[in-house]
Image (cartoon, grey):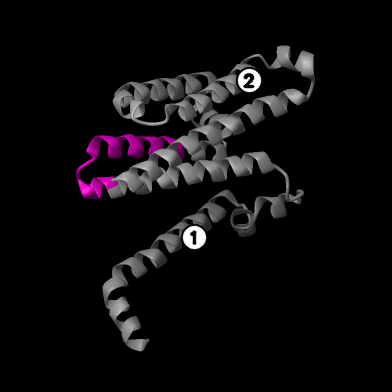
Amino acid sequence: MLEQVAVQSRALYRVLFLIILIPLLFLAAVAVISVQTEHAIGTLTRDPMTVANLHPITGIVSNVGVLTWAVGAAVSLFTAVVLLRRGDERPFALFLLTAGLLTAWLLLDDFFLLHEIILPHYLGLTERPLFLIYGTLGLGWFFLFRNEIRQTDFLLLLSGVFFFGASILIDGFQENVQAVVGEWRILLEDGFKFIGIFGWCAYLVRCCARRLTTA
């Protein structure tokens, strides 16, 4: 046992160093932010539900959506790295890499409310141009990797895109929809987005699983 620990220590000391260093740097940055913004350190380290004294199920749909984004991003990026290291499936690896990065950005957007609060407040970007940018990036991704997409079960991808589109459509006609269904509009808008997230991430996970098991 001790011999194994010694061997692993010599082999993994760089990894262990990074495992400790990266969280420490992040915590140091959080401490600086706490001092600079005069927010109590607990506000930045504790669970938001505890800080705001909210019920634990507050935002449950949004939270599960973020977790689903995380699954899609992690699986795609991991598979892309594996395929790149093999060196024989570079086009498909790049397809998954870009999909994983896009998914990771959408995760950050949802988690930190980038398009709703951060970007409009600090960069002056409103939702409409941001959605235009997202749409352009999405169409560009579809065009660049159209050949790779044809090799996959793209019906899952199309289902995700369909529900995203339905959510955006409801968001664009909020007053009209609310006049018909009242406050249930929120369930429709967020619900369609939630289904879209599952469709998108299920597509990515299936792509990765099939590629790794058939390679």
Camera-near label (1 vs 2) is 2
Instruction: Name above or below for residue 49 compared with residue 174.
Output: below
Q: Position of residue 131 (x, y in %)?
A: 50, 22
Q: Considering the numbered disc 1 on the image, is that residue within a helix, a strand or a loop?
A: helix
Q: Position of residue 119 (x, y in %)?
A: 51, 31
The residue lying furthest to the top in this view is 176
Residue at 23 percent across and 40 percent down: it is 89
Choose between 168 and 201: the one closer to the eye.
201
Q: In the shown orientation, is residue 25 left or right of residue 117?
A: left
Residue at 77 percent across and 49 percent down: it is 55
Q: Residues within 10 Å of mark 2 (few under 14, many from 20)?
A: some
Magenta stretch in the rendered image: 83-104
Q: Earlier in the sequence, mark 1 or mark 2?
A: 1
Q: Main secondary structure of the magenta part?
A: helix
Mark 1 and mark 2: span between their CA atoms?
A: 37 Å
For label 1, the residue is 27
The residue lying furthest to the left in this view is 87
Q: In the shown orientation, is residue 84 left or right of residue 185?
A: left
For label 2, the residue is 171
- Looking at the image, do the residues carrying marks 1 and 2 touch, with CB atoms under 8 Å apart? no
